[in-house]
Image (spheres, grey):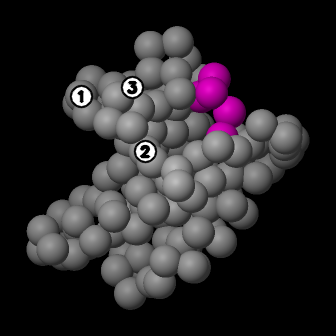
């Protein structure tokens, strides 16, 4: 069973801001994926859900779904990038399987998987 170690999760505000500012974004219906290839946060991942999504219960569910989608496929993700997954409104009603499928699709487009390269000429 795959686990997501706490040391790999981005917690500090400064790290989140760096990924937001400099990272490249790829969007799906359910979330936005920020990819940031830098040494300071290398191999780490962060999860966010803004207050526009709803109350704390809803935001925590969104982050739980994001974590689960990542956790299931973390062994495929390259170690030289930091990721930030930010939930969108459509995710409030989404099921886990849809999130997992969207993560694989956006991840392939972003080139975060070890066996794939980023697509040229497309920008989200």
Residue that badge 2 annotates: 4
Residue 49 in the image, given as x and y percentages of width and height: 29, 59
Question: What residue sits right under mark 3 in the picture?
Answer: 18
Q: Is residue 113 above or below residue 101?
A: above
Q: Looking at the rendered structure, which numbered label has been put on residue 97?
A: none
Give neighbour class at mark 1: few <14, some 14-19, many 20+ (Cα, 10 Å): few
Residue at the limit of the structure toward the front, as seen here: 1
Q: State the extent of the magenta-drawn residues as a range.
A: 77-81
Is residue 51 highlighted in magenta?
A: no
Residue drawn at 51 percent across, 39 percent down: 83
Q: Earlier in the sequence, mark 3 or mark 2?
A: 2
Distance Cα–Cα, label 3 vs label 1: 10 Å
Q: What residue sits 18% from the left and 64% below the top?
A: 51
Cβ–Cβ below 8 Å for labels 2 and 1? no
Residue depicted at x 45% and y 21%: 41
Q: Which residue is mark 1?
A: 12
Residue 74 falls left or right of residue 111: left
In the displayed structure, 52 sits above or below 76; it is: below
Percent x, y of residue 84: 45, 43
């Amino acid at each position: 069973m795959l686990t997501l170690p706490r040391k790999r999760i981005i917690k500090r505000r400064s790290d989140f801001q760096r990924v937001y500012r400099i990272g490249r974004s790829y969007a799906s219906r359910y979330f936005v994926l920020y990819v940031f290839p830098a040494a300071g946060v290398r191999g780490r991942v962060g999860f966010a859900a803004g207050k526009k999504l709803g109350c704390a219960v809803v935001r925590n569910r969104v982050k739980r779904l994001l974590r689960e989608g990542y956790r299931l496929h973390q062994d495929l993700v390259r170690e030289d990038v930091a990721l930030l997954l930010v939930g969108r409104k459509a995710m409030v009603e989404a099921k886990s399987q849809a999130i997992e499928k969207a993560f694989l699709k956006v991840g392939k487009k972003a080139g975060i998987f070890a066996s794939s390269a980023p697509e040229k000429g497309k920008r989200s």
